[in-house]
Image (cartoon, rainbow, N blue to C red):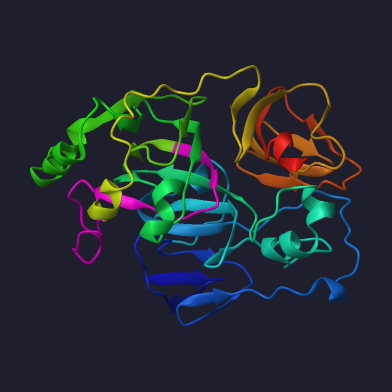
């Protein structure tokens, strides 16, 4: 596998359920891992948090990806590659967000999380890494049928639990999502359908359009259909177990790895025919891991209360976020210590996703 590091190609090993390729910013890769420097708190000076933080995206090449992140959202993609994912907010050993510009330019999200948590994120529950990961996904082709392990089995399987949420930012006519099973089944019957090549007939298919959303608890059998451009908010995890990859082959003519045994231990075989998200006012989803709201911005509006952080992702129009000009597909993090925490529309119609961690988790 190849990793692009600021335009340089270096080799890297892929492993089941982990990111395969990426465009990493201002970090050093050695052998099979990437290392990020984190300065101890005693060496840090006070932070300038007058403006929202913007991070460098990390671009992941995928067999099912395309170029839509460039044409729709203006991302500067590496030429000639099928980019399926832009990791916009990430704090993982193998992939690390870094601040794009300003006084904190080059600092990693992990650095900020470990050494300046209160100023930037407010009073959050303790964890070794920032607990959510946000991506933009371009599915030019459909993704594999897959599952992420629930907490009850993840540790035993050597993985991490992953609950996620999809917002459909753009969708071609006829676009679909795949989520849950059509009917309750048993592990034995499901395994037999894998063997006889009919497993794709077992997944529930949902037609979608721009503005739709889907919640996927860990353990839900799922895939993204072709023609979707999504915003994904998820638990900080990269454990994915593939069941079926539509019999396609990579550029070397080889099929991608499957993880059937791990998937069979992770799938909820009683999870059938889930519905799309039904918003409660502006709230699309709220759980112990994250809360996502959709705002239509008309009058100026306070992004969050003092002492609380929020991440904004602009969907349509143009907006000013505390002095930062946002275009569709751009994200920013408004810190807990920010004094200016107002978002204003700069066009006749602006909409955004507001992502945070529920207040009950911050107390």
Indicate whether residue 255 is drawn in magenta.
Answer: yes
Query: Residue 305, image x and y in percent?
Result: 84, 35
Query: Residue 264, image x and y in percent?
Result: 26, 47
Looking at the image, residue 248 lies above or below residue 35 = above
Residue reaching furthest to the left: 196
Image quarter where the N terminus lies is: bottom left
Q: Specify whether 174 is left or right of 338.
A: left
Looking at the image, residue 116 lies above or below residue 288 = below
Image quarter where the C terminus lies is: top right
Question: Could you tell me which residue is drawn at 71 percent across and 73 percent down?
Answer: 38
Quadrant in the picture for residue 130: bottom right
Residue 289 in view, yes or no: yes
Query: Residue 257, image x and y in percent?
Result: 25, 60
Question: Could you tell me which residue is drawn at 87 percent across and 48 percent down?
Answer: 337
Question: Could you tell me which residue is drawn at 7 percent across and 43 percent down?
Answer: 196
Looking at the image, residue 180 lies above or below residue 139 = above
Q: Specify whether 61 is left or right of 119.
A: left
The magenta segment is 229-258
Residue 310 in view, yes or no: no
Quadrant in the picture for residue 207: top left
Q: Main secondary structure of the magenta part?
A: loop
Query: Residue 231, image x and y in percent?
Result: 53, 39
Q: Specify whether 23 is left or right of 108.
A: left
Residue reaching furthest to the bottom: 31
Q: Specify whether 187 is left or right of 166.
A: left
In this rendering, the count of numbered labels is 0
């Amino acid at each position: 596998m190849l990793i692009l590091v600021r335009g340089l190609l270096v080799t890297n090993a892929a492993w089941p359920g982990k990111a395969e390729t990426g465009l990493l910013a201002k970090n050093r890769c050695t052998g099979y891992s990437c290392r990020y420097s984190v300065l101890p708190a005693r060496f840090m000076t006070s932070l300038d948090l007058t403006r929202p933080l913007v991070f460098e995206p990390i671009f992941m090449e995928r067999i099912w990806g395309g170029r839509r992140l460039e044409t729709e959202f203006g991302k500067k993609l590496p030429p000639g590659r099928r980019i399926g994912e832009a990791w916009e907010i990430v704090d993982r050993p193998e992939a690390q967000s870094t601040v794009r510009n300003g006084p904190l330019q080059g600092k990693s999200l992990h650095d900020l999380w470990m050494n300046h948590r209160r100023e930037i994120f407010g009073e959050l529950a303790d964890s070794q890494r920032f607990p959510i990961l946000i991506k933009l996904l371009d599915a030019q082709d459909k993704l594999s049928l897959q599952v992420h392990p629930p907490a009850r089995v993840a540790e035993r399987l050597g993985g991490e639990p992953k609950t996620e949420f999809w917002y459909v930012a753009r969708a071609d006519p006829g676009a679909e999502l795949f989520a849950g099973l059509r009917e309750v089944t048993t592990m034995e019957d499901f395994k037999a359908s894998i063997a006889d090549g009919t497993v794709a007939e077992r997944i529930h298919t949902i037609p979608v359009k721009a503005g739709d959303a889907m919640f996927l608890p860990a353990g839900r059998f799922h895939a993204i259909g072709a023609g979707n451009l999504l915003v994904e908010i998820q638990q900080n995890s990269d454990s994915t177990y593939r069941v079926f990859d539509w019999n396609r082959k990579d550029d070397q003519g080889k099929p991608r790895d499957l993880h059937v045994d791990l998937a069979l231990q992770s799938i909820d075989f009683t999870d059938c025919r889930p519905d799309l998200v039904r918003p409660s006012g502006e709230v699309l989803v709220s759980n112990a891991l994250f809360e996502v709201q959709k705002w239509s911005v008309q009058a100026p509006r306070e992004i969050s209360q003092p002492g609380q952080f929020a991440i904004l992702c602009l969907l349509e129009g143009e907006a000013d976020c505390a002095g930062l000009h946002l275009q569709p597909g751009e994200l920013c993090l408004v810190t807990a210590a920010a004094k200016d925490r107002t978002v204003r529309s700069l066009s006749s119609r602006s909409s955004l996703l507001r992502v945070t961690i529920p207040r009950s988790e911050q107390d």
